[in-house]
Image (tube, rainbow, N blue to C red):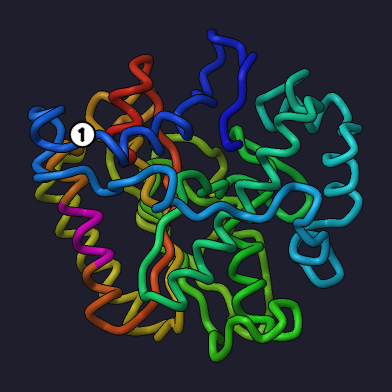
Amino acid sequence: RYSFDGWPASHTFPMDKFERTAHALTTTCKATHPQSSNLPRPLVRNGDTDFFRPLDFADVPRSWLAKPTGPIDATFFDSFVSGQLDYEHCRYIGFRQQTSRPELIERTVLEVAGTVLTAQLAHQWGIASNVAGGTHHAHPSGGAGYTILNDLAVTANFLTDEVLNGETVKGINKVLVIDLDVHQGDGTAKFDLGNSRLSTLSIHCASNYPHPKQLSTYDIGLPDKVRDKEYMEILESSVNKALHEVEPDFVLYDAGVDVYENDTLGRINISLDGIRARDRFVLEKCVNAGIPVAAVVGGGYDKDVDALARRHA
């Protein structure tokens, strides 16, 4: 449901990458794609039984998303889900006339519900990943940059409010978002959940979208064309500092692959091996510290959507 038919083939945003990422998780290994995978077998063995699915669209509680209990402005939320956003909102989001399509509205809400489910699973098992999510440009009262509802803020709010989550998640007081998408998580930075419930670390390309930047808890702006070695040095010191100072009870990890050296919108030069090393460092750091971590796919742009899906997988 994260992807749907009829999306304009010429649009910059690859709507079908989510379906293809799920497929890649069940097929990609060294035997099938030796140039892009070292895995002896696919990460997911059975696509029918090994994927969890979020609630149906009609069953996703409005209270999770919109104020007064959720973090998103209620007027904006209601206008979006009813297909009545004005032209300027739709233009700023980047989907223009597509924004009011029922398929887009449904997949947008389901994407947020999927990240909430991912967090619940990570709380139970220590680690989990959504095959969508990372809508980090969306802010409390609007969308931007191909993102409409901020799943990271919604999920952080859900995790830290035991009344809202019905005590299905307990003991989470502080959530740290580690955002490694090539673009700054400016929308997430605009959410104030109060009581230091949400902290943000954004490591992004300084010259890239958005302009102007917002103030995250920690912002690391990288120069254009930075490569693996320097990137990993900055990543390790920044993540270590944030984990030490914030002492989070939970980590949301935006694993955008638009840092890839050949990404259409990237501007920095991280190799496939560099992306693997990055992800392994963040995930192992959290797991070894006993901090539950929920990952989302974040950004990634390539005309070869199957190759992009394998990078996400």
Residue 167: give x, y in percent of width and height: 66, 86
Instruction: Name the residue: 68% across, 81% down.
Output: 161
- Which of the two residues, 213 or 38, is positioned nearer the viewer here? 38
Magenta stretch, residue numbers:
277-283
Dividing the picture into quarters, in which one does residue 245 lie?
bottom left
- In the picture of the structure, the residue carrying the numbered disc 1 is 269
Residue 242 is situated, as x and y percent measured from the top left of the image, at 35, 75
* Residue type (three-letter) at the residue carrying disc 1: Asn
Q: Secondary structure at mark 1?
A: loop
Out of 184 and 57, give the one closest to the viewer: 57
Left or right of 282? Residue 250 is: right
Disc 1 crowd rating (10 Å Cα; few below 14, some 14-19, many 20+) is some
Percent from the top left, x then y, of residue 228? 13, 45
Residue sitting at x 51%, y 67%: 119
**Quadrant assignment for the N terminus:** top right
Q: Nearer the viewer, residue 267 or 178?
A: 178
Is 255 part of what is drawn in magenta? no
Horizontally, residue 225 falls left or right of residue 177, namely left
Residue 265, percent from left and from top: 40, 26
Question: Is the residue 130 above or below the residue 30 in the image?
Answer: below
- Residue under the point 38% across and 21% down: 305
Q: How many numbered callouts?
A: 1
Q: Is residue 280 magenta?
A: yes
- Work out whether 21 lies above or below 241: above
Characterize the magenta stretch by its predominant secondary structure: helix
Residue visible at 54% across and 91% down? 171
